[in-house]
């Protein structure tokens, strides 16, 4: 094992949450009378907080972002949160990693959603640390990764790797001085050429191969 700490993104990396997030976003858009958006485009926004991308797409202002987030979050929490599944092989990967290294999660999903979802999916017990977006939305992905690194107690950042499926994950890893593995089976990074810092994995199996090589 080349690393002492492995810090995962959640959506698009360990779990496929696209159905629930897209369903909640589409219903919020209907409630607010937004123009219809192709579902494929909507799914491509998953990773960073989806409200920011939706509002930017339509050119709406900050007040509209507050309205969208309020409607979306209520729908997601009450109706769609559990429309998510663990990628095949991810549970076993976490279990095997936890035997010898620090395992963390750093996600832009809000902390209350994250706690509920990970508990019900049985992932919480396989992690040493879970960092999620604060209720006020003041933290960003770099903050979350940095918090997880601090919790790990590992000072040699060459021995730490961040794993995620978006440019936000890649940037956070680079800014924190950690290695990065971009997964191309998620929502953001689609191929190896999209990754400028670190390596690429196109499946949980190839990710396992990199981590245990």
Image (tube, helix red, strand yellow):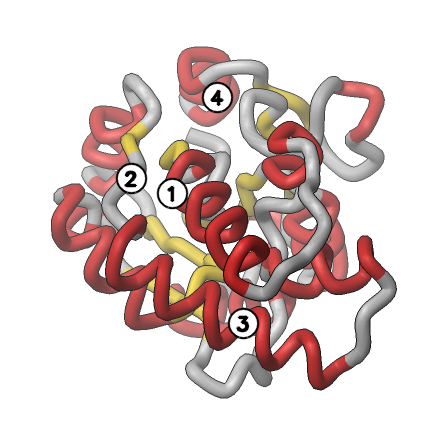
Which part of the image, by quadrant, shows the N terminus? top left
Disc 2: which residue: 83
Mark 4 or 2, nearer chain start: 2
Cα gap from disc 2 to disc 3, whole angstroms = 19 Å
Disc 1: which residue: 20
Identify the secondary structure beneath mark 2.
Answer: loop
Cα gap from disc 3 to disc 4, whole angstroms = 33 Å
Residue displayed at 30% across by 62% down: 77
Q: Is 199 situated left or right of 47 in this image? A: right
Where residue 135 sits: x, y (%)?
A: 43, 82
Disc 4: which residue: 207
Where residue 156 sits: x, y (%)?
A: 57, 58
Q: Is 106 situated left or right of 88 in this image? A: right
Q: Nearer the viewer, residue 74 or 129?
A: 74
Instruction: Indicate which label's residue lies in the foreground, 3 or 4.
Output: 3
Mark 2 or 3, nearer chain start: 3
Cα gap from disc 1 to disc 2, whole angstroms = 5 Å
Identify the secondary structure beneath mark 1.
Answer: helix
Q: Dot 1: within a 10 Å radius of its alpha carbon, few (fewer than 14), some, or many (20 or more) residues?
A: some
Identify the secondary structure beneath mark 4.
Answer: helix
């Amino acid at each position: 094992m080349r690393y002492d700490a492995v810090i995962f993104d959640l959506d698009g990396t360990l779990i496929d949450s696209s159905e629930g997030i897209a369903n909640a976003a589409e219903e919020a858009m209907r409630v607010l009378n937004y123009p219809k958006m192709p579902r494929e485009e909507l799914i491509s926004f998953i990773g960073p907080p989806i409200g920011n991308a939706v509002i930017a797409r339509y050119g709406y202002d900050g007040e509209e972002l507050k309205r969208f987030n309020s409607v979306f979050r209520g729908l997601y929490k009450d109706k769609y949160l559990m429309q998510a599944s663990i990628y095949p092989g991810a549970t076993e990967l976490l279990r095997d990693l936890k035997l010898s290294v620090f395992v963390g999660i750093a996600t832009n999903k809000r902390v209350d959603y994250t706690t509920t979802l990970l508990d019900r999916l049985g992932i919480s017990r396989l992690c040493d640390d879970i960092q999620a977006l604060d209720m006020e939305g003041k933290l960003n992905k770099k903050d979350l990764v940095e918090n997880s690194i601090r919790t790990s107690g590992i000072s040699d950042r060459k021995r730490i790797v961040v794993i995620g499926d978006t440019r936000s994950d890649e940037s956070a890893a680079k800014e924190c001085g950690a290695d990065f593995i971009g997964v191309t089976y998620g929502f953001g990074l689609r191929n190896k050429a999209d990754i400028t810092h670190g390596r690429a994995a196109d499946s949980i199996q190839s990710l396992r191969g990199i981590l245990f090589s």
